[in-house]
Amino acid sequence: MGKVKIMLNYLWGIMIVLGITVGVLRGEIGEVSQATINSSKEAVALCITMLGIMAMWTGIMQVAKKSGLIASLTKALRPFLRLLYPDIPKDHVVNEYIASNMIANILGLGWAATPMGLMAMKELKKLNHDSEVASCDMCTLLIINISSLQLIPVNVIAYRSQYGSVNPAEILGAGLVATICSTFVGFVFSVIARKLSYRNGHR
Amino acid sequence: MRFLIYISDYIIPFLLFYIIGFGLLNKTNIFDEFIQGAKDGFKVVLDILPTLIGLMVAIGILRASGALNIVSDFLRPLTNLLHFPSQLVPVAIIKMFSSSAATSLVLDIFKEYGPDSYLGRMVSVMMSSTETIFYTLAVYFMAAGVKKTRYTLLGCLLTTLTGIIMSVIMTKLVF
C-alpha cells in the first residue's frame, strides 16, 4: 500500500512538472493555464453525470441484495469455485467471501468487492499457516480478480455518456466477450500453475 | 459480429427487468431499497471526485502542452508494428497502476477523438476488460502479509494482455 501511494505521488508530480515544462518549451503555456482551470471544472461536470448513473446502479443492486438475488447467485457460483479451489474445505467460510467478491466484481461493484476479497485473503492466510509465501489459492484469487469478469462497466458508460456518445452502452457486448476471454485465460493459467506447483511439492 | 451491438442494447434493460421482477416476486420493498442504495451511490461518486480532479488537471496539462502527442509520436513506429494505436499505449500502461489516472487518459481520448470514434470505442472496451494489477496485488497481499507472490504477477499480466488484445480484435470485428 505504501509503495503504491509513493508511486502515485511521483506519477502525479511528474505529470504536472513535465507537462508545464513541455508547455513552456513549446510556447503553449496559455493553453496549459486554461487546461488547468477547465480540467478541474470538467471533473465536477463528469461527477454530476456519474452521480445519476452510479446512484441508479447502486439502487438497483441494493434491490438485488435485499431480494436474495445476490445470495442465490453466490450459491450458483459454488460448483465453479470447486474447480478453481479444489483444496478449500467445502463448508469453510472463505468460500462465501470468494464467491461474494467475484459476484460484486461481475456486477461492477468494485468498492463492495474489495472488503470481501480482503476477508477472503485473511482466511486463506490461516489456511496457509500464516506463511509469507502465497498459496495457490491466493494466486488464483488474485488472477481471477484481475481478469475483471464484469457484466456492466458502469463507469465507462457514464464517461461515454458525458462526452456525448450516441449510444453509450454499445460497447457492452464487445467488452463482455473480451473480458470473458481474459478470465478464461486466467482460469486455465491458474489450474495449470496449480498442477505444476503440486508436482514441485508446493501448496 | 454486428449482433453484439444489438445484444449490448438488451443487457441493461434485461438486468433491470430481472432484478426488479425477482424483487417483486420475493415481496421485497423494492422502491425503499432502491432509494437506500442510490444514496450509497452518491457517496461512492463523492469519494472519487477529489482524486479525479487532481488527475484530470494533470492529464489536461499534459495534453495542452503537447507532451501526450510527443509520447504517442515517439511510440508510433513500434505500435504500428503491433497494430495497436499509439494513443492508447499510455492508457494500457497506466491502467496497471492507477485506475483513476487511466480514467483521466480515457476522458482525454473521448475529448480528442469522441467516444464513438474507433479509438474511443476501443479504449472503452479496453477499460472494461482490464484491471489495476499492481494496486490490487499490493492491497491484497499486504492484507495477507505475503511477501512471495509466486506466479500471481505472471498470471495477471497474461490476463491483462489477453484483455488488451481482445479489445483490439473485438473493436475491429464489431464496429
Image: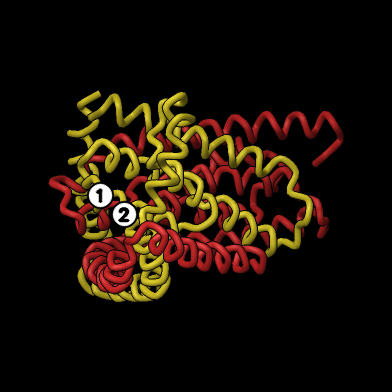
Chain colours: A red, B yellow
Are the residues under badges 1 and 2 in a single subunit? yes
Percent across and percent down for residue B161 are: 52, 35
Q: Which of A127 and A160 is in front in this view?
A: A160
Whether pointer 1 and pointer 2 mark residues with C-beta atoms closer than 8 Å, the reply is: yes
Is A146 positioned to the left or the right of A120 in the image? left
Give the mark count: 2
Q: Which of B117 and B57 is in front in this view?
A: B57
Q: In which quarter of the image is the C terminus of chain A?
A: top right
Taking the spot 67% from the left edge, 39% from the top edge, the residue there is A86
Q: Residues within 10 Å of mark 1 (few under 14, many from 20)?
A: few
Percent across and percent down for residue A29 are: 33, 66
Taking the spot 64% from the left edge, 52% from the top edge, the residue there is A91
Q: How crowded is mark 2: few (under 14 residues within 10 Å), some or many (20 or more)?
A: some
Instruction: Determine which of the numbered discs, if any, sits on residue B108 in the image.
Output: 2
Identify the element where label 2 is drawn. Answer: helix
**Residue designated by label 1:** B112
Chain bearing tag 1 is: B
